Amino acid sequence: MRGDGDGWVFDEGARYWGLHGAAGLLLRAPLPDGEVGVLLQHRAAWSHQGGTWGLPGGARDSHETAVDTAIREAGEEAGIRPGDVSVVAALVTHRTVGGWTYTTVIADVERPVLTTANGESAELRWVPEAHVATLPLHPAFGSAWPGLRERIAALDSTT
């Protein structure tokens, strides 16, 4: 489904998907072994930065909040039902000089939910937080991951 946010923005000599910015869902769940898992998307080879691992996400439409976008995209790309998700925080994890932003929405589910990949995913996988950095990450997600882990740790320490 095309939205009014679909399209490339060129800024700082690079291109970014989403005329109104973009957002992705960092979905967490307790794993059976007691670790916390993160739902990652192995991006289809044909996609921008294909073959890397990142978050389900995409272009923000003009009428959406970043949270709306992340939840919609996770539904489209991974079959995540909005009612299963409990949003914890939303962080701008990339901002260009021209003002384009990517927002990472951190959310929890009670247990790893079943996923259904669409054509944008080669695979969806629940990965223990401690092992995320061992995968070939989408460059922007790889850059944001250390700060996201710090924010997650801070959020977890308040509960």
Image (tube, rainbow, N blue to C red):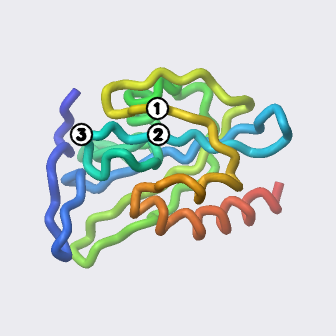
Rendered view: 119 above or below 87: above
Residue 96 is left or right of residue 149, and the answer is left
Residue at numbered disc 1: 123
Residue at numbered disc 3: 46
Residue occupying image coordinates x 47% and y 68% = 143
Kind of residue sitting beneath label 2: Gln
Distance from Cα at disc 2 to Cα at disc 3: 14 Å
Characterize the local packing of mark 2: few (<14), some (14-19) or many (20 or more) Cα atoms within 10 angstroms: many
Picture quarter with the C terminus: bottom right
Residue occupying image coordinates x 65% and y 63% = 149
Residue 98 is left or right of residue 150, and the answer is left
Pinpoint residue 156: horizontal percent, then vertical percent: 78, 57
Tell me the number on the disc at residue 135. none
Q: Earlier in the sequence, mark 2 or mark 1?
A: 2
Pinpoint residue 93: horizontal percent, then vertical percent: 45, 65
Distance from Cα at disc 2 to Cα at disc 1: 6 Å
Pinpoint residue 66: horizontal percent, then vertical percent: 41, 50
Residue at numbered disc 2: 41
Residue occupying image coordinates x 45% and y 34% = 74
Q: Secondary structure at mark 1?
A: strand
Q: Earlier in the sequence, mark 3 or mark 1?
A: 3
Front disc: 2 or 3: 3
Rendered view: 32 above or below 151: above
Front disc: 2 or 1: 1
